[in-house]
Amino acid sequence: MVLRTDDARFAGLPDFPYEPSYATVGTLRMAYVTAGPADGPVALLLHGEPSWSFLYRKVLPVLADAGIRAVAPDLVGFGRSDKPPAAAHSYAAHVEWVRALAFDALDLRDVTVVGQDWGGLIGLRVAAEHPDRVARIVAANTGLPTGEHGMPKVWWQFRRAVENAETLDIGRFVQAGCAKPMSDEVRAAYDAPFPDESYKIAPRLMPGLVPVSLEDPAAPANLAAWQVLRKWDRPFLCAFSDGDPITGPMAPILRKLVPGAAGRDHPVIEGAGHFLQEDAGERLGEEIARFMTR
């Protein structure tokens, strides 16, 4: 059964005045919010696990003020988007859902893909598989694992904690990935999409969809995406924080292997953890805007 969070759960969100829009991808409804001029250059802001588009609330107004059309979807299973059963979820399915929203439903072109955490795992695949639609890429605390190399110990700790928690405290997990304390209202906003455990299938499953061996179903597609990224000569920016033990080691790899990253001033977002949008969203927004408009 597909679940859909009641709209009342999203009333009174702090600093997030954006009205949601919806599109159908396959048989599911995906939600997204937009900011900025309709005719501006497009930034597709992809969140990760276990957050939703609320994570970009500090980034959206900065991009809008720079004349950029910012589009921030909720991944399937998160935010206001539909929450299908476990059998619907796979890495390939999430890539297809984002592709269908961005390119079929919204017909976005010359897109700057911005991906953090799973937003990057999905966004890098979308960009590599549809380079005709993508003008630039911003990788922010993310990577594209293929199963060739082991994941860090801290990631395995996170995966086991998510899989084994009797009650998955979404707000606590987001807070654990931040360098700065969140208010009770902000923490409640991260909890809002998930009234009870039956709504948390995607947050529980996503760590298990990351390829950890070459036998993983997603490994071949990620290896193929890397073949494209190794030749990617369009602008590519790494905007990583200085305090993310999970994805931090990916920044030098991306800068070294992606041609479009060469010779570029890649910012380090100081005083921020894994969820750098939460800790330093305005700074991240400024770096994205500078990258897109210079």
Image (cartoon, rainbow, N blue to C red):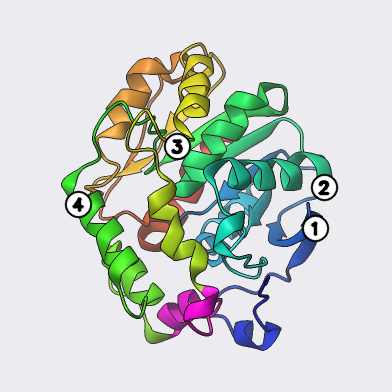
Q: Which residue is mark 1?
A: 23
Residue 12 lies in quadrant: bottom right
The residue type indicated by label 3 comes to Ala
Magenta stretch secondary structure, dominant: helix
Residue depth check, mark 3 versus mark 4: number of the one nearer the observer:
4
Q: Which residue is mark 2?
A: 105
Q: CA distance from mark 1 to mark 3?
A: 25 Å
Position in image of residue 77 (x %, y %): 58, 64
The boundaries of the magenta stretch are: 185-199
Q: Residues within 10 Å of mark 4 (few under 14, many from 20)?
A: few
Q: Is residue 272 above or below residue 263?
A: below
Q: CA distance from mark 1 to mark 4?
A: 36 Å
**First-in-chain label (2 vs 1):** 1
Q: Which residue is mark 4?
A: 154
Query: In the orientation shown, which residue stands out farthest toward the left?
Result: 153
Q: Which residue is mark 3?
A: 139
